[in-house]
Image (tube, rainbow, N blue to C red):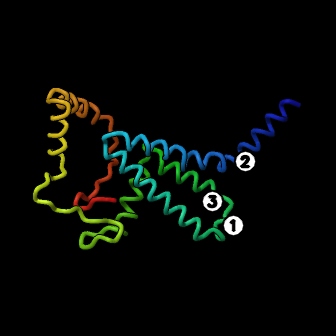
């Protein structure tokens, strides 16, 4: 009799897996990762999670718009869970891929900037926001020895990196 209770529990758990895992995958982990990204000095993880939240908002708007149609699709919750996993898990880099290939071309063009993006101000008195400025700032804060060690660590880590990176147009600042 005890075996059938566990069996029933597992059946209910598997039947409602999407309901249980969905919020964890789509909200809890991204929330945790976003907080950690804010606390690091790396802008790359900030871009990853800002991109994710943009796409999550678009999925939510899609669901709200087509709710009556979606309720007739029994696999929607599982499809959404799989899509969200692909967007969230950094190994797949799904959020960056979707943003770079679909969202960004729609909202940003070379000639004009749509209302979602504000051009970076060109101030003659400020330093350019580039890699050299960042390197100078790092050397001032940590010293040249630490900077050289960082470069050596980066060279060693380059062999293990994934080549699926996202390139953002630096003429625009994303707000």
- Left or right relative to 139: residue 80: right
Q: Distance between the residues labelled 3 and 1?
A: 9 Å
Q: Which residue lies at the image location 14% right of the left edge and 60% below the top edge?
A: 123
Furthest toward the front, the residue is 125
Residue named by callout 1: 72
Please determine whether, in this image, residue 42 is positioned above or below residue 154: below
Q: Residue 6: x, y in percent?
A: 79, 34
Mark 1 burial class by Cα count in 10 Å: few <14, some 14-19, many 20+ = few
In the foreground, 5 or 112: 112
Say what secondary structure mark 1 lies in. loop
The quadrant holding residue 37 is: top left
Among the two numbered marks 1 and 2 on one chain, the one whose residue lies closer to the N terminus: 2
Dots 1, 2 in contact, CB < 8 A: no
Please determine whether, in this image, residue 148 is positioned above or below residue 109: above
Please determine whether, in this image, residue 112 is positioned above or below residue 169: below
Mark 2 burial class by Cα count in 10 Å: few <14, some 14-19, many 20+ = few
Q: Residue 107: x, y in percent?
A: 36, 68
Say what secondary structure mark 3 lies in. helix
Q: How far apart are marks 1 and 2 (CA)?
A: 18 Å
Mark 3 burial class by Cα count in 10 Å: few <14, some 14-19, many 20+ = some
- Left or right relative to 54: residue 84: right
Furthest toward the right, the residue is 1
Dots 3, 1 in contact, CB < 8 A: no
- Left or right relative to 125: residue 115: right
Q: Which residue lies at the image location 48% right of the left edge and 48% below the top edge?
A: 88
Residue named by callout 2: 15
Residue named by callout 3: 76
């Amino acid at each position: 009799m005890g075996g059938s209770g566990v069996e029933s529990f597992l059946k209910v758990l598997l039947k409602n897996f999407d309901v249980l895992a969905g919020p964890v995958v789509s909200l809890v982990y991204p929330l945790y990762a976003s907080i950690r990204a804010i606390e690091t000095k790396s802008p790359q993880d900030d871009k990853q999670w800002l991109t994710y939240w943009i796409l999550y908002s678009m999925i939510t708007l899609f669901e709200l718009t087509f709710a009556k149609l979606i309720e007739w699709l029994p696999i929607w919750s599982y499809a959404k869970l799989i899509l969200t996993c692909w967007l969230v898990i950094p190994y797949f880099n799904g959020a960056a891929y979707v943003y770079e290939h679909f969202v960004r071309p729609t909202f940003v063009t070379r000639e004009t900037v749509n209302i979602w993006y504000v051009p970076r101000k060109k101030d003659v008195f400020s330093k350019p926001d580039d890699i050299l400025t960042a390197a100078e700032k790092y050397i001032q804060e940590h010293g040249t020895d630490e900077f050289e060690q960082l470069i050596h660590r980066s060279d060693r880590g380059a062999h293990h990196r994934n080549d699926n990176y996202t390139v953002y147009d630096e003429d625009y600042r994303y707000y």
